[in-house]
Amino acid sequence: MKLSDFKTALQSVKTVRFLTPDGGEVPSHFHITEAGLTTKHFIDCGGTVRKESVVSMQLWTADDYDHSLTPGKLLGILNKADALFENRDLDLEIEYQGDTIGRYGVELDNGLFRLVSKQTDCLAKESCGISSDDRSSAQLHAPDLQPANACAPGSGCC
């Protein structure tokens, strides 16, 4: 979900509720501890330098059960942070604590914000000799069952 879509949705909901990917709900007394621009500048396994940016928000809960963030208050937080986003309409990413800090996409689902699991992906499949069939197979099988040419030592990948 783009930041603009999230802001528009905040104007149409009565409460801010987040659902976790496993169907649970983020406690209603959550805090937004961070709202900012997260940029990752990296080189992929094919040698291409890349830069990706997202708007990130961190959800956190404490023992202050009487706390509740309204849609208007959250919209105000995001509007204050607009300068950090450099006037770009970027994807929104939510950080939330599970067994470790998870990073999720967001979708609007019947007035609720659903945290959507993100997946890793090879950005240089052509350099690694990985076809879409190999990728589907790799997701279904253990890593030791991947094709021998997929990121093998000396292949120029990984």
Image: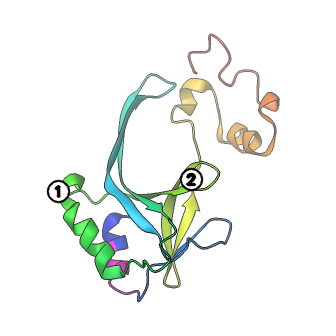
Dot 1 surroundings within 10 Å: few (below 14), some, or many (20 or more)?
Answer: few
Q: Position of residue 131 (x, y in %)?
A: 65, 36
Look at 55% across and 73% down and name the residue there: 27
Q: Which quadrant of the figure has residue 145?
A: top right
Q: Position of residue 96 (x, y in %)?
A: 52, 58
Q: Which quadrant of the figure has residue 127?
A: top right
Task: In this rendered view, identify the residue nearer to me: 91 or 47.
Answer: 91
Circles 1 and 2, Cβ within 8 Å, touching? The answer is no
The residue where tag 2 is placed is 118
Say whether residue 152 is left or right of residue 105.
right
- Kindly state the secondary structure of the residue where label 1 is placed: helix
For badge 2, the amino acid type reads Lys
For the N terminus, which image quadrant?
Answer: bottom left
The residue where tag 1 is placed is 83
The answer, for residue 1, to whether it is visible in the render is no
For badge 1, the amino acid type reads Ala
Q: Position of residue 13 (x, y in %)?
A: 41, 86
9 inside magenta stretch: yes
Say whether residue 40 is left or right of residue 128.
left
